[in-house]
Image: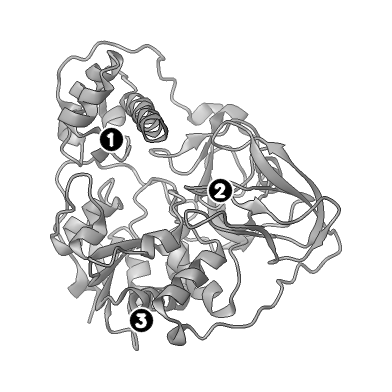
Amino acid sequence: MSMWDHFKSKTFSHGIHLPDKKEHTKDQAIRRLPFAPELVIPLSQHFGKPAIAIVQPGQEVVRGELIAKSDGFMSVPIHAPASGLIKAIKLHATARGPKTEAIIIQTWAGSNQRTASFDPLDIPSLTHEQFIQAVQDTGMVGLGGAGFPTHVKLSVPPEYRIDTLVVNGCECEPYLTTDHRLMLEHPEALLHGTQMLMHALGAKQAIIGIEDNKMDAIQALDEHLSGFEPIQVVAVPTHYPQGAEKLLIKVLLDREVPSGGFPYQVGVVVQNIATLSQLGELLPHNQGLIERVVTVTGTGIDKPGNYIIPLGTPIQFLLDQVGFYGSASHLILGGPMMGSTVASLDVPITKPVSGLLVFDDTSIEKVSDDIYPCIKCARCVDACPMHLNPSMLGQLATKHHYDAMQQNFHLMDCFECGCCSYICPSNIPLVQYFRIAKSVLRESALKETTS
C-alpha cells in the first residue's frame, strides 16, 4: 500500500502549531560520540525504585556488564556503558536537582570498548512471563522522555486484552529528530522490536503513527514492511502535542482513554520509536541498554546532529565535542516544551534524555519575569488538548486549593505539555503551578498510605 494511502487528515482538537526547528539535524546521519574519560551512572534513571549497585570501588568492568540490579518489579538494572575501573560510588548531581547515588567509571583509554557477549535469546520460544523478565533485564525504559520501565508497561492486568500496539513516531517537540533518524537508518530494528512486542502482548495489529513532516521516514518504513504485514504506517497531521499517547490513540483508533485511566483499558499499549528500535537490537542478543541516540542542536554549538552517546557521559564532555560557545544558563535537556533546564554541566546523559538544546544569548528572546493577572482571555482553554480549564486550575493553585484542582477540575489528566504556558499573554507559569500541585497531592497520598 502506498504511503499516501496511509494518510490521515484527522487530528485532535485544540493544541498548538509550533515551528519545528528540525532543519539542522533531520538530514544528518547519526554519529558516535567518543567515550568520556569518566562516566557518571546514576542508580536512579527511571520512574520507580533506584537500582542497587553490585560492584565495588576498584573493580574492573567490561562494557555491557551488569553493574546494578533492579530493586523489585518497579525498577530496572544498569549495565556498564564502557570498560573501565569503578572509581567510586557516591552522591552526584543529576538533572532532577537533588544529588543521587551514582557509580563513577574511569574508562580505559586504550580499550576497543567491545561489548561483552551473552547467550542469545530465542524470542519466539519465550513465555509471556519470560519475555517480560527479558525486557526488564535489558534495563529498558521509555526513551521518549518519561523513563517509565518498559516491562511494567507491558504487564497488562489479566482482565484486559490488547488488540493494538501503537508506536509513537510523531516526535512533535521542536528541534528533536532522534526518532526521525532512527526510522530512516534503522527501520528493520524498529519493525523487529514492534513484531516482538506484538507477539508478547497478543496484539493483532500495530500502527506506527508519524507526523506528516517526516514523509521520508514513512517511505523508509513502507519499503521494509514486506513480512511485517500486521504493521501499518500512518501519517498524521503535524500538530503539537500529537505524540501524547491518549491523543494519538484517539486520532489513530478513535478510542477514548477514560479520565484517569490507562491505554490498556481500551485495548492499546503505546511505545516510543527509540524504545522499540533498541529492543529490536538488544533483546535477541540478551544485552542491556548502555547508550542511546540524542539530538544535540541549537545556536550555541558548531556541530549539531544526532549522536550515539554512552549513558553517563557528562554534559560538559559532550559540549566540548560539539563546539560549545553558548551559555550554561541556556541548556535544556529534552525538548523546549516539556524539557528541563540543566542545573550543572556535571550532570550526565541518562536513559530518558532524548535531546540537549544549546542556545547562545542572541537567540534567546528576552522575556519578562513579571507575571500579570489573568485577563480571562481563554486562550489556555482553547489550547489545552485535554479540554481542561488551565485558567481556573492556575487560580486555584495560587490559593493552594490543590484538592479542588484534583477533584473538580481533573488536574491529574494534565500531562504538562506546556500549551497553556506557551499561549498565555500574562506570562503565568501554569505548568509549573500544576507540577507543584501534583507533587503536594502525591506527598499527601503517600503520607496517608504510610500512616
Residue at mark 1 to residue at mark 2: CA–CA distance: 27 Å
- Residue 45 bears which disc, if any? 2
Look at the picture and state if 2 lies above or below 355: below
- Residue 223 bears which disc, if any? 3
Can I make out residue 256 in this image? Answer: yes
Residue under the point 34% across and 82% down: 225
* Side (left or right) of 432 relative to 40: left
Residue at mark 3 to residue at mark 2: CA–CA distance: 35 Å
| Label 3 element class | loop
Q: Residues within 10 Å of mark 2 (few under 14, many from 20)?
A: many
Look at the picture and state if 72 lies above or below 319: below
The three-letter code of the residue at mark 3 reads Glu
The percent coordinates of residue 267 (x first, y second) are 21, 65
Quadrant location of the N terminus in the rendered image? bottom left
The three-letter code of the residue at mark 2 reads Gln
- Residue 419 bears which disc, if any? 1
Residue at mark 1 to residue at mark 3: CA–CA distance: 35 Å
Can I make out residue 359 in this image? Answer: no
In this view, the residue in front, 20 or 57, is 57
The three-letter code of the residue at mark 1 reads Cys
In this view, the residue in front, 444 or 140, is 444
The percent coordinates of residue 339 (x first, y second) are 45, 39
Q: Nearer the viewer, mark 1 or mark 2?
A: 2
Look at the picture and state if 92 lies above or below 120: above
| Label 1 element class | helix
Residue under the point 14% across and 25% down: 378
